[in-house]
Amino acid sequence: MWVQLGCSLLIFISLIFFSLLPYCGLSVGARSKNGALLLSLCNCVACGIFLSTCFLGLIPHVIMQERAIRQSWGTPAAGAANIHMEHDGAAAKNMTGGLSSTADFLLNTQLLVLAGFVVILMIEQFIFACSGHSHSHCEGGGGGHSHLHNEDDGEMRLHRLVGDSASAPLVDGLFDEDDDDDMDAIVFRKEGGVDHASPQLAGGHGGHSHSVSLSSGLSLRTLFLLLGLSVHSLFEGLALGLQAEGADFYSMMFAIMLHEILCCLAYGVSLAQQRAPTGAAVVSVLVLSACIPAGMLVALVVSMVEGSSAVVIRFVLEALAAGTFVYVACVEMLANELQQLQGRNGVAASFAVAAGVLLFAALQSASHHH
């Protein structure tokens, strides 16, 4: 009992440190051209880590949970071992066992992961529509320039984006070291928390701003990322807390800490990339760092009410969290970085993503052999 409490406190402090380390360190050099490039490449590495977290960590674990649920509900083991294959005819009937057709349809890892992706997409677009933040589009007579719906600072943003020559590369214009006004374009927030990010930097294709800052000071991207990481961390802490003190407990804690340190480093990079306000960044880091200890503390309560309902709830939440990872990594992070980095920098970005994937895979393999 006391060992677990001590470990939970150690985990909490460690995750705070590894989350704030890249946020504080990378924010210092974000105003220089080389610093901005390094920040983007670090974000690409983080993207690879998040994709690996989803495809190498979350989804395999959720599939195992699906098999366990099907077995507990009367599905034959042979059928459960092949749930990823397409159902048809009598084979589908044998696989579902005691499940109804509706339950068999909904009890699908891939479907729930896609649902998590679509739900986050719909929520983001709904918030954009209700908040009236910038959705830009190209008009026929505009020469291909983005015309923003927010007209108060539209001309200023357009001037920063286009520069003196419409044919000049957008990235070179943004990172012009001789022009302080242009340099401001890479800063994602101003004093007072007002977001004046360049649409080309903050948004995806077509000038759609994905870096909208809410009243909390954090962008939607960061909030969705925090949501996905928090759900995953909470259940990791829950699994760790359910382990008896001993070899199994320390082995699982070692594996979880390797994974969570990587995720916290990547989250800190994302905070630095978004230029999140210090207060909001610290609060979000505290929330994320507290999820594993909270899961460990809740483990006793979960063990008391553990049953089919608790397993299904965990299965659904982790599958939705996996969809959140895919959305944030591919739509929010990677698409934005590839929009900014061109030529050789784009090639470097692809290698950075691969490095993130290989780093996570190597550490995961090392933890399995520990």
Image (cartoon, rainbow, N blue to C red):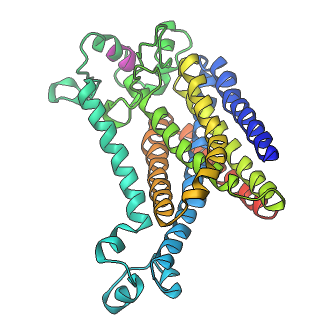
- In the drawing, does residue 151 fall left or right of residue 5? left
Query: Where 79 falls versus 366 (above or below)?
Result: below
Residue furthest out toward the front: 304
Residue 122 image point, x, y percent: 30, 43
- In the drawing, does residue 162 fall left or right of residue 323? left
Q: Quadrant of residue 263?
A: top right
Residue 287 image point, x, y percent: 58, 32
Between residue 46 and residue 278, name the one nearer to us: 278
Residue furthest out toward the bottom: 90
Between residue 304 and residue 356, name the one nearer to us: 304
Residue that appears at 65% across and 38% down: 264
Quarter the C terminus occupies: bottom right
Query: Where 66 falls versus 11 (above or below)?
Result: below
Residue that appears at 61% across and 18% down: 32
Task: Specify whether residue 145 is in view.
Answer: no
Please tell me how many numbered marks the rendered image carries. 0
Residue 279 image point, x, y percent: 57, 17
Residue 277 image point, x, y percent: 54, 17
| Residue 364 on the magenta span | no
Residue that appears at 42% across and 44% down: 331
Task: Specify whether residue 78 is in view.
Answer: yes
Between residue 369 and residue 338, name the one nearer to us: 369
| Residue 161 on the magenta span | yes
Task: Give the residues drawn in magenta, as a range.
Answer: 158-163
Which is the main secondary structure of the residues drawn in magenta? helix
Q: Quadrant of residue 10?
A: top right
- In the drawing, does residue 176 fall left or right of residue 220? right
Q: Quadrant of residue 134?
A: top left
Query: Where 115 falls versus 63 (above or below)?
Result: above
Residue that appears at 41% across and 68% down: 108
